[in-house]
Image (spheres, grey):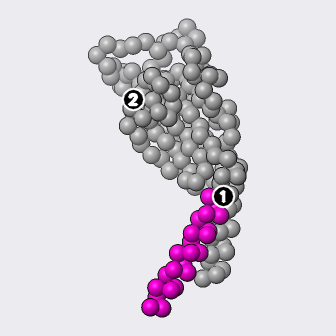
Amino acid sequence: MKYFFIIFSALLLIYMLWPGPTKISDLSPLPSSAKSTLSGDTVQIPNVSAYFSNNFRDFVVPFYTKNYQQNFLPFPPLRLNHPPEYSWTVIKKHTETTYLEELVYPLRDSLYVNGYEIFRPDGTPIFYSVPKLEEEGKEWQTKTTLRLYTSNIIVRIIVWAGILISMQKIFQLGKRIAKV
């Protein structure tokens, strides 16, 4: 049992200290897209970036899943689907959205992928009155906004130590209960 605990704690520490993206510019831009220059999509909010494109959710989310995982860990991040209203909290206020997904490595970092699609992939409009998405003099069908949340390395080490101490205390308590 002691060896299992040592191996587990070493693997958990490696996982928590493994380097990953530290800023939004570490991630690749969407292919065939235009970087947004709208207020709030550039430098006003840290680790936020937005792109106008004709890429839909079925392309965008797998693209960023692979991009976020690349040169990182041998397994993909967890993919969580959030209600669109949550984008006002995690991206920025007044973010237009039709979907919001979180790519997360637990106890580490999160990447939120927010998409705003005014058309379905077959070309039919989603909304009754279709707004225009224009950037660089061109009309686009979708806008993707990304926000990266990173964690401090010191905090990760403190959490790692807390997990190990908790596991040890729970194991000791279990042994005492088993003796009774």
Residue 124: image x %, image y %? 32, 21
* Principal secondary structure, stretch drawn in magenta: helix
Rendered position, 148 above or below 116 = below
Whether residue 1 is visible to the viewer of this picture, yes or no, is: yes
Q: Which residues are magenta?
A: 158-180
Query: Measuring 43% from the left and 12% from the top, which residue is drawn there?
Result: 132
The residue identified by callout 1 is 158
Rendered position, 72 above or below 163 = above
Query: Measuring 67% from the left and 74% from the top, which residue is drawn there?
Result: 6
Secondary structure under badge 1?
helix
Query: Measuring 53% from the left and 21% from the top, which residue is drawn there?
Result: 52
Residue 41: image x %, image y %? 57, 22
From the image, which quarter does the N terminus lie in?
bottom right
Rendered position, 61 above or below 10 = above
For the residues labelled 1 and 2, the Cα–Cα distance comes to: 37 Å
Q: In this view of the protein, which residue sits in the foreground, 168 or 16?
A: 168
Secondary structure under badge 2?
loop
Q: Which mark is residue 98?
A: 2
